[in-house]
Image (cartoon, rainbow, N blue to C red):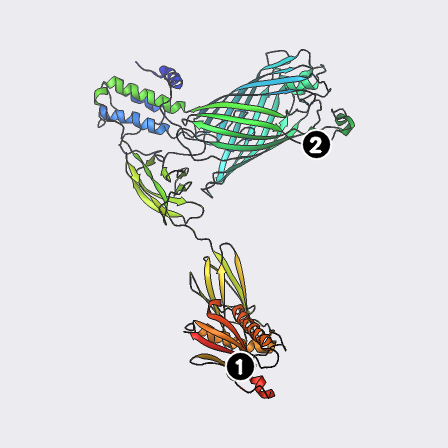
């Protein structure tokens, strides 16, 4: 007969067995099946409830008259599902939940137990070796430490932990060379609370009991205490695509191990080997970790820490006794460490931690009673995570089934979960989109990512029903879809992400003849069409537009129209300044059937191709006609001179003047392909060159419409 006395034995048997259940990665996943019950049969809420079920079956008094023996088998399946709610968290150097030296303001799910074994080592030698304050060239040192730790989370806001530590240090400068510590014990507790979805606060307190020098029993005079305030910030609830957490610790170490000297005169080497320190310390730590998406059977969480311990009460005389003598400053003796590391959960129940302490700081000195920091220390640890309460429940329920002798008729536990699987593709060419992040709306479930090869993804087990998934990838528009999860099935769901077009900025100003700001209509034509209005106070206008070629046309009442041809590039701003010319009271430039007639002369500097400023308004009239008559495909700008000077000179001068007019029109926004410039010199007079009036008429510029 199974009794309550047998429950611990069953739990022990279960612990040593190879786990057939899966705990979740640290902080990563809480199964949506928690609390679900679709069969009408409730799983045992505790060991006591399970025991009562067992006694009722043994006495052939069912807890529910309507509950068949087959239905009792369902209970076992539900218990196994409940086991998947375990949240996996790894232990830090002190045994409590955290990174390595920086602790987390949180812990595992309630009732979870973590067993941890780990250690560290370093080797050093030569004149530059660690603790070589005598300058001995034959110096060498090796250090190794080991640790056993256990932690328990009895409540959602409380964690208790304990660790046992031993170390061995060999230094060729000490006598004896080998110094050891055995069984230093630390006990502690940590409280924590999540005040916001992304922010948790906490505090821890630990007491260290150390053995006396050369003994195996605790010397309570050396009992030390540490405490700290803990802050943890999780970026994932705010930006799901960024798996990043930050942790800040600020605390105090009340150090009493200096009492272990008891009249002995310990050297720096002995103090380091026996972990004897004289000064209380303020301890600060900052850490970052990146819990990357879980890829069965492993996950990877890289982390980085910085810690510093500030000794309290060091006098100037004590600093002068440091290894740098009179040059020793307070900063020289402050212990500082930079600790990069990586955490690898395996099979969702075991994790491997590897980290390296790197001693940092400026010119290093050693002072008796201040913890010395080696140039490096390599650390490693293994952690095993389990919930003994749920494992015990499963064993008892299985015994219930066996007692009823209905094994041959067992009904499999109902499957209440399913998965979603599919691909994330580029909507333009159906190419795979690698590294797209898929998040779940309204559920505390870690995101999954599409793979590199085919853009495939597959979710965790999710409770049957409707769920919303959002796919995000930098450079693409996010996409949200709703899918129905069917129990025991994989629901296909593909995402076609549209590339997100990076835009450029079109910006400009519109001003009048005296640079006063103008209110104008700005018509933009290209990949998109826009109608903007310049501001009355500044004449400015601006808008974001997709990259491409644009024609920008500016129209203001009482002014001649102007335009620009602009090329907009992604993430760049193009500035266009428009200076408009007032419309003349009497028409000076007239559009006729085969030409644009200019009723005033375009003046140039004598003998040169430089346009005089008084002619810009006339040319702006030509610009106005070309902008407002896009049907004119091409014009020929003809330059003519009188007969004064050589024919060769006049031909060259007329060509240069025609090209100067062409350049001005292009600067005002007329497309180059619509313009052609030809100089005829004195070849085509319209009046005799033997009079002053006739020569003035022959010096002219004409605009002939070639194609429309």
**Label 2 Cα crowd, 10 Å radius (few <14 / some 14-19 / many 20+):** some
Nearest the eye: 109 or 191 = 109
Q: Is residue 434 above or below residue 526?
A: above
Q: In this view, does 432 lie above or below 109?
A: below
Residue at 28% of width from left, 38% of height from top?
A: 486
Residue at 33% of width from left, 15% of height from top?
A: 3
Q: What's the mark number on residue 240?
A: none
In the picture, the quarter occupied by the C terminus is: bottom left
Element class at badge 2: helix
Name the residue beneath numbered marker 2. Answer: 331
Measuring from the top left, give residue 706's x and y in whole percent: 44, 74
Occupied quadrant, residue 663: bottom right
Nearest the eye: 654 or 647 = 647
**Label 1 Cα crowd, 10 Å radius (few <14 / some 14-19 / many 20+):** some
- Labels in figure, total: 2
Measuring from the top left, give residue 136's x and y in whole percent: 72, 18
For residue 542, say whether it is visible.
yes
Element class at badge 1: loop
Name the residue beneath numbered marker 1. Answer: 584
In the picture, the quarter occupied by the N terminus is: top left
Image side of residue 405 versus residue 329, left or right: left
For residue 559, say whether it is visible.
no
Occupied quadrant, residue 305: top right
């Amino acid at each position: 007969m199974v009794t309550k006395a047998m429950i611990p034995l069953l739990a022990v048997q279960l612990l040593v067995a190879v786990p057939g259940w899966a705990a979740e990665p640290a902080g990563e996943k809480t199964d949506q099946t928690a609390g679900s019950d679709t069969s009408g049969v409730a799983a045992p809420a505790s060991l006591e409830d399970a025991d009562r079920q067992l006694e009722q079956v043994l006495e052939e008094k069912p807890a529910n008259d309507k509950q068949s023996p087959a239905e009792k088998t369902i209970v076992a399946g539900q218990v196994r599902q409940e086991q998947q709610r375990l949240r996996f968290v790894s232990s830090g150097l002190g045994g409590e939940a955290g990174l390595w030296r920086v602790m987390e303001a949180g812990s595992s799910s309630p009732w979870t137990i973590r067993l941890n074994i780990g250690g560290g080592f370093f080797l050093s030698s030569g004149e530059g070796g660690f603790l070589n304050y005598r300058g001995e060239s034959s110096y060498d040192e090796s250090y190794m430490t080991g640790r056993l730790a256990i932690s328990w989370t009895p409540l959602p806001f409380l964690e208790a932990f304990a660790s046992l530590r031993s170390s061995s240090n060999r230094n060729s400068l000490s006598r004896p060379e080998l110094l050891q510590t055995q069984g230093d014990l630390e006990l502690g507790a940590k409280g924590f609370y999540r005040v916001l979805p992304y922010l948790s606060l906490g505090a821890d307190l630990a007491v260290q009991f150390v053995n006396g020098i050369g003994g195996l029993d605790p010397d309570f005079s050396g009992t030390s205490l540490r405490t700290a305030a803990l802050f943890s910030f999780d970026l994932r609830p705010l930006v799901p695509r960024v798996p990043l957490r930050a942790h800040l610790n600020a605390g105090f170490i009340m150090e009493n191990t200096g009492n272990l000297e008891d009249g002995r005169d310990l050297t720096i080497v002995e103090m380091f080997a026996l972990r004897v320190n004289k000064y209380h310390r303020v301890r600060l730590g900052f850490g970052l970790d990146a819990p990357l998406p879980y890829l069965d059977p492993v996950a990877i969480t890289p982390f980085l820490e910085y810690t510093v311990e500030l000794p309290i009460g060091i006098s100037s005389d004590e600093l002068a006794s440091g290894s740098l003598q009179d040059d020793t400053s307070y900063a020289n003796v402050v212990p500082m460490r930079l600790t990069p590391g990586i955490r690898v959960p395996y099979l969702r129940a075991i994790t491997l931690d590897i980290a390296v302490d790197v001693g940092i700081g400026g010119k290093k000195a050693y002072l008796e009673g201040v913890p010395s920091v080696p140039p490096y220390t390599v650390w490693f640890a293994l952690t095993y995570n389990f919930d003994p309460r749920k494992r015990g429940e499963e064993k008892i329920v299985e015994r219930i089934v066996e007692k009823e002798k209905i094994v041959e008729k067992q009904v499999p536990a109902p499957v209440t979960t399913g998965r979603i699987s599919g691909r994330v593709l580029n909507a333009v060419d159906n190419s795979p989109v690698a590294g797209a992040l898929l998040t779940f709306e309204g559920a505390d479930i870690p995101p999954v990512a599409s793979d590199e090869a085919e853009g495939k993804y597959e979710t965790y087990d999710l409770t049957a029903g409707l769920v919303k998934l959002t796919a995000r990838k930098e450079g693409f528009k996010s996409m949200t879809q709703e899918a129905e999860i069917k129990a025991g099935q994989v629901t296909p769901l593909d995402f076609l992400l549209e590339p997100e077009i990076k835009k450029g900025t079109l910006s400009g100003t519109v001003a009048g003849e005296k640079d006063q700001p103008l209110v104008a209509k700005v018509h933009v034509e290209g990949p998109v069409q826009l109608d903007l209005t310049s501001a009355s106070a500044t004449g400015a206008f601006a808008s974001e537009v997709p990259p491409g070629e644009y024609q920008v046309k500016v129209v203001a009442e009482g002014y001649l129209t102007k335009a620009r041809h602009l090329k907009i590039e992604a993430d760049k701003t193009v500035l266009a300044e428009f200076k408009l010319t007032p419309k003349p009271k009497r028409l000076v430039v007239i559009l006729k059937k085969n030409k644009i007639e200019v009723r005033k002369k375009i003046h140039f500097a004598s003998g040169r191709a430089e346009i005089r400023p008084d002619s810009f308004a006339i040319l702006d009239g030509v610009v106005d006609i070309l902008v407002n008559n896009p049907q004119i495909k091409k014009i020929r700008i003809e330059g003519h001179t009188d007969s004064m000077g050589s024919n060769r000179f006049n031909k060259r001068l007329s060509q240069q003047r025609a090209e100067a007019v062409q350049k001005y029109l292009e600067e005002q926004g007329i497309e180059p392909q619509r313009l052609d410039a030809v100089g005829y010199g004195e070849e085509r007079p319209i009046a005799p060159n033997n009079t002053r009036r006739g020569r003035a008429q022959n010096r002219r510029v004409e605009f002939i419409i070639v194609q429309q």
